[in-house]
Image (tube, rainbow, N blue to C red):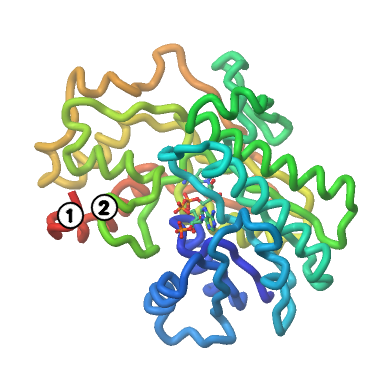
């Protein structure tokens, strides 16, 4: 299947790109610059232009950013939309987080409706943030039927809320579009909680690491020795399982029109520390112990569940354990340590 993948330079998208190519799809991916296209090309030596090509989309929130991008020869049959800002450095939360997420999603699916009649499936990388509203009691298990009902006022109150809301509003906009416009394609969303895992995308140094993996970096390499990072979400998924879920979601007809909660379950900072302690004796001295484990610790009264039944039954996903994820992540970050340009 000829597939358009947005945001190919990202942590998750790089794994989706690998999974697409491995499963025989031909891919056009959007990146923000020619430099990023070259970096991706370099990490896929021997892959032909027919199987991997690039389009520059410098800013997904620009009006009509995707209007021509969705046109290709041979024509696209599927679209996977991952590009969306995930960082908490926003100065202006509307401009930096909400607009690109919402306008990017709406702009893309409008373009598909207008200019890409051959597309049958559109996959949107949403988030657990679009499912989990924290006003429910912490004994609750979330399912695909749940929505985080954030208001615009809450959304604009701080960067973390704005990021969470950007996922709520952009996913909602996609479903609203389908309901109102009845387009020629179906939408599917995948809703991961915290995504951890080895990096296969290009980074210059560990300061440029994607947001979710910062936790693993900080715990593994000494930054959290005196105090563990805050934890907002005690549920996780391995990036490789998530990437495969994306590709299966465009391949499996029953996935059309569905949302998917994807996660093997809960984790805590302590669990991550243990995984690292057991496997990397040379890192033990920098790991947090005792009171340093208290910030962001798993609540004694428990935390929300996340029902993965549908992901197993419809997509057939089987989830990697945390230990494998953490060990592979640390190994992928290790080459960047002590390079002089990292931390
Ligand atoms: P990354 O930051 O690694 O990837 C984000 C991608 O979006 C990058 O390719 C980035 O381009 C692109 N992007 C961001 N803003 C713009 C913009 N204005 N114009 C064009 N491109 C833009 O993060 P992840 O891989 O973690 O995130 C990918 C998706 O997964 C996002 O939709 C995110 O919300 C979602 N997600 C992630 C979770 C996680 O824990 N990692 C959890 C739940 C959902 P560039 O590299 O050039 O900046």
Q: In the visual, does 303 lie left or right of 66? A: left
Q: Quadrant of residue 89?
A: top left
Q: Is mark 2 within 8 Å of ligand 1?
A: no
What is the spatial separation of the Cα atoms under label 2 and label 1, in whole angstroms?
Answer: 7 Å
Quadrant occupied by the N terminus: bottom right
| Location of residue 203 in the rendering, given as x and y in whole percent from the top left corner | 33, 61
Instruction: Report which residue position mark 1 lands on.
Output: 337
Residue 241 visible? The answer is yes
Q: In the visual, does 310 lie left or right of 203? A: right
* Mark positioned earlier in the residue sequence (2 or 1): 2
Q: Residues within 10 Å of mark 2 (few under 14, many from 20)?
A: many
Callout 2 touching callout 1 (CB < 8 Å): yes
Residue 23 visible? The answer is no
What residue is rendered at 62% in x and 16% in y? 136
Instruction: Report which residue position mark 2 lands on.
Output: 206
| Location of residue 166 in the rendering, given as x and y in whole percent from the top left corner | 60, 39
Q: Quadrant of residue 68?
A: bottom right
120 shown above or below 157: below
Q: Nearer the viewer, residue 17 or 168?
A: 168
Q: In the visual, does 78 lie left or right of 133? A: right
* SS state under label 2: helix
């Amino acid at each position: 299947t000829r597939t358009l993948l947005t945001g190919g330079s990202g942590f998750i998208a790089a794994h989706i790109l690998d999974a697409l190519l491995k499963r025989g799809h031909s891919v056009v991916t959007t990146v923000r610059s020619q430099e990023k296209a070259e970096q991706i090309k370099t990490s896929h030596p021997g892959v032909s232009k027919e199987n991997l090509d690039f389009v520059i989309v410098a800013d997904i929130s620009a009006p009509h950013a995707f209007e021509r991008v969705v046109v290709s020869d041979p024509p696209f049959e599927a679209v996977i939309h991952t590009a969306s800002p995930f960082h908490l450095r926003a100065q202006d939360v509307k401009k930096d987080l909400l607009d690109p997420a919402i306008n990017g999603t709406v702009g893309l699916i409008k373009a598909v409706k207008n200019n890409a009649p051959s597309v049958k499936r559109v996959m949107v990388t949403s988030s657990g943030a679009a499912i989990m509203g924290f006003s429910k009691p912490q004994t609750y298990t979330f399912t695909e039927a749940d929505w985080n009902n954030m208001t615009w006022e809450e959304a604009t109150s701080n960067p973390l809320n704005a990021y969470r809301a950007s996922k709520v509003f952009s996913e909602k906009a996609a479903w609203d579009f389908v309901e109102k416009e009845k387009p020629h394609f179906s939408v599917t969303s995948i809703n991961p909680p915290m995504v951890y895992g080895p990096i296969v995308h290009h980074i210059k140094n560990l300061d440029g690491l994607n947001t979710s993996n910062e936790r693993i970096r900080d715990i593994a390499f000494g930054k959290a020795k005196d105090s563990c990072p805050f934890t907002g979400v005690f549920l996780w998924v391995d990036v490789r399982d998530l990437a495969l879920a994306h590709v299966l979601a465009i391949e499996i007809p029953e996935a059309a029109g569905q949302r998917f909660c994807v996660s093997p379950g809960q984790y805590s900072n302590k669990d991550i520390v243990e995984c690292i302690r057991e496997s990397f004796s040379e890192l033990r001295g920098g790991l947090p112990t005792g009171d340093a484990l208290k910030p962001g610790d798993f609540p004694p009264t428990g935390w929300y569940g996340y029902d993965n039944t549908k992901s197993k039954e419809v997509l057939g996903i089987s989830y990697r354990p945390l230990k494998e994820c953490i060990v592979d992540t640390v190994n992928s970050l290790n080459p960047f340590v002590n390079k002089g340009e990292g931390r």
